[in-house]
Amino acid sequence: MVEKNLDLLFEFEKYVLQHPEVAAEIPQDAVVFMRLVGDEKFNRWSRRLAEKHVAQGRPIFCVTIKKMKPIHSRIEALSLERAA
């Protein structure tokens, strides 16, 4: 769960760099948690983690990932040779 959360947060950061208007809607002291459509186990885990901050009075924002592109390599060219 932790690794998936980190991956989604990283993707969200990249998204925000391309769409800074999204970041403008989120206060600096806010807790942002990720939700992934179709993964209820992860969503429950992520929500519970975020709710721990409610007692601190921090605003909580949910980012729902509706669809992601497949992960692909950035390699444009390579060579392959048998070494042994």
Image (tube, rainbow, N blue to C red):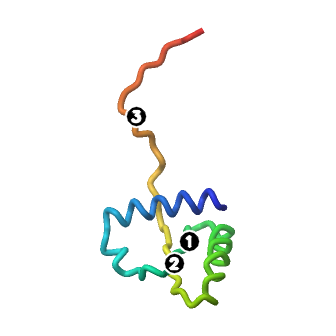
Between 41 and 56, the residue placed more toward the observer is: 56
Q: Position of residue 80 (x, y in %)?
A: 47, 18
Label 1 and label 3: CA atoms lie apart by 30 Å
Residue 62: which numbered mark, if any?
2
State yes or no: discs 1 and 2 in contact (Cβ < 8 Å): yes
Query: Does residue 33 lie above or below 4 as drawn?
Result: below
Q: Residues within 10 Å of mark 3 (few under 14, many from 20)?
A: few
- Number of numbered discs visible in the structure rendering: 3
Pick whichever of labels 3 and 2 is earlier in the sequence: 2
Disc 3 residue type?
Ile
Identified at 51% across, 75% down, the residue is 32
**Mark 2, secondary structure of its residue:** strand
Horizontal side, residue 47 vs residue 17: left or right: right
**Mark 3, secondary structure of its residue:** loop
Q: Quadrant of the C terminus?
A: top right
Identified at 37% across, 66% down, the residue is 16
Pick whichever of labels 1 and 2 is earlier in the sequence: 1
Query: Does residue 80 lie above or below 46 as drawn?
Result: above
**Mark 1, secondary structure of its residue:** strand
Disc 1 residue type?
Arg
State yes or no: discs 3 and 2 in contact (Cβ < 8 Å): no
Disc 2 residue type?
Cys
Query: Does residue 46 lie above or below 29 as drawn?
Result: above
Q: Position of residue 79 (x, y in %)?
A: 42, 20
Identified at 49% across, 74% down, the residue is 63
Q: Position of residue 18 (x, y in %)?
A: 31, 62
Identified at 45% across, 43% down, the residue is 72
Label 1 and label 2: CA atoms lie apart by 7 Å
Q: Which residue is the site of mark 3?
A: 75
Where residue 54 sits, quadrant-wise, is bottom right
Q: Which residue is the site of mark 1?
A: 35
